[in-house]
Amino acid sequence: MVIKKTDDIKSSEITPKDVYLSRRNFMRGAALLATTAATGYIYRALNAAPQPRVEGEKLADVVRAEPSKAAANGYTVNEKLTSFEDITNYNNFYEFTTDKGDVAGVARGFVTRPWTVAVEGLVNKPKVFDLDDLLKLAPLEERIYRLRCVEGWSMVIPWVGFSLSNLLDAVEPNSSARFVQFETLYDPKRMPEQQGGSLDWPYVEGLRLDEAMHPLTILASGLYGEALPPQDGAPLRLVVPWKYGFKSIKSIVKIRLVSTQPATTWSAYAPREYGFYSNVNPNVDHPRWSQARETRIGEYGKRDTLLFNGYAEQVGQLYSGMDLRVNF
Amino acid sequence: MKDIKFYKLVVFVNSLVPLSLMGWDWYHQQLGANPVEFLTRTTGMLTLVFLFISLAVTPLRKMTGAQWIIQLRRMLGLYAFFYGFLHLLTYIWFDRTFNLKSTVADIYARPFIAVGMLSFFLMVPLAITSTKGWIKRLGGKRWARLHKLAYVAAVGGVIHFWMLVKSDARLPIKFAFVLAVLLGSRIVIKQLKQKPQTRTLIPPA
């Protein structure tokens, strides 16, 4: 007697070997594809893509100096301009983030109106300027400067602004004023890294009065003919082309004339590595890296760094007799 | 399913993803404003990531009992070495323009370069002796002891990373934390294993 097993799988239901294998291969292919996509996604998520360009307000009536004259006094430089995209997507602005590629994204939508700048201290006419009034103190000029970051990279940027001396003349520094101190906005709600971060806030910088009065030292409110984007220091920043970039303080709200050398953020953080002067100097290395050469953004090779960032002719006399190794 | 060949393929392909994307971005000129700095930083970070993953294999195996994952370790370690080599190459190529003399001078002048270089060269004997033949030749125990150097290389790599940041050390601190967890898990696993042997019976009074 044949006992029929009821749970026998009918031969028609057994998956043929080739179908089984192709199904297995299909599953494997899918798994391989899925993990690869996930890895790619993680890589992309960790590396911020450049931000789409935000059209800045066009600045009217920008004066362009006569080229030959401008070249002689350092107001322009005959080198290829760094692209707008690179200038606005590679930034050191630790109030927003320490990731240079991500400042543009984090700073997007930073509100810069209303904005006031208090100019005070040892002056005869202290005043809190509304930004738009301050920008009417002198005609806006285009200044094409090299910018050398202490980290070893550089750019060529067409700034729009005017000499800081125009503002200082307006408030009349008195005879005991020797230094100028600058302060960035302190507002942790708008500048998220100020809620903690790695430096003491607000960011402060300083110049000797003669450095501040030098015509090359400018207050900039724009670049490439447009209002400054937030990541580049909107709405008003300092630009001191012969010093490392961190001296060119951004988003300024206060300028104070003082009699003694003021504290500056990076120098206070690491006095051995960053001095008050921080003049670009290929012969004085940062304790941890060389300053002899630099990467020009947009180029692959390295080029030699120039003494005072190439402005020695204009500013060298400010430091005559000074030991630049001691006063780094 | 212990389909080790397939798993190896998955690890092999996935480990090539960062390199492929870097190559793609290089070709399309979208490595950002400072491509050399980006490549140097990213290959350095990938070296540490692969070192860490390879160092996580043994603790994971002991915790989960999944013995087969040990077979993926060699490939992960070799990828760490491979990305470390690319990292060194970007430095020697773009920063030193293949100038041996200036490279040596730079190692001498900058401790963070020296530490990084040392960590890389610690991985060289590990890469060479990663084959089955070398395991046999050295004997399992000696081979295992030699390959503890992976930890020294990882510690050196994290120090190298930490030494070069300007002020924001949060990322190297995170790497150091993960490494501490990896090292700590080994100690904990070892202790747990020893426990039954050290338990003493309290004699009745």
Image (tube, coloured by chain):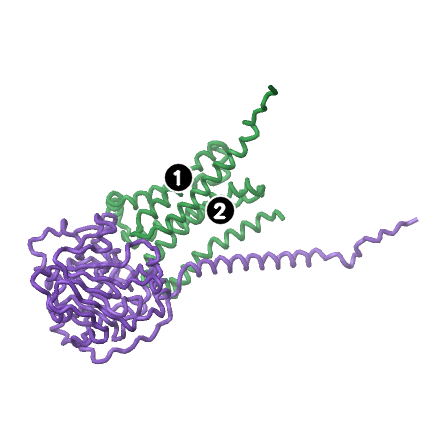
Residue for badge 1: B152
- Image coordinates of residue B113 in percent, x first then y, are 30, 46
User: What residue is shown at x 57% (from left), y 51% (from top)?
Assistant: B6
Chain letter for mark 2, please: B
Q: Judge whether A12 appears above or below A117 on screen.
A: above
Q: Are marks 1 and 2 on the same chain?
A: yes
User: What residue is shown at x 20% (from left), y 70% (from top)?
Assistant: A128
* Label disc, if present, on residue B75 of the rendered structure: 2
Q: Earlier in the sequence, mark 1 or mark 2?
A: 2
Chain letter for mark 1, please: B
Compared across the picture, whether B195 is left or right of B35 comes to: right
Chain whose colour in the figure is green = B
Residue toward you, A263 or A25: A263
Residue toward you, B147 or B85: B147
Residue A256 lies in what quarter of the image? bottom left
Residue A68 lies in what quarter of the image? bottom left
What's under tag 2, amino acid-wise?
Met
Which residue is farthest top?
B205
- Image coordinates of residue B167 in percent, x first then y, are 30, 52
Q: Judge whether A21 appears above or below A231 on screen.
A: above
What's under tag 1, amino acid-wise?
Val
Compared across the picture, whether B148 is left or right of A203 comes to: right
Q: Few, some or many C-alpha atoms within 10 Å of disc 2 (few <14, some 14-19, many ≥20)?
A: some
Shade of chain A as shown in the rendered figure: purple
- Identify the element where label 2 is drawn: helix
Q: Judge whether B119 appears above or below B165 on screen.
A: above
Mark 1 or 2: in front is: 1
Report the number of numbered marks.
2
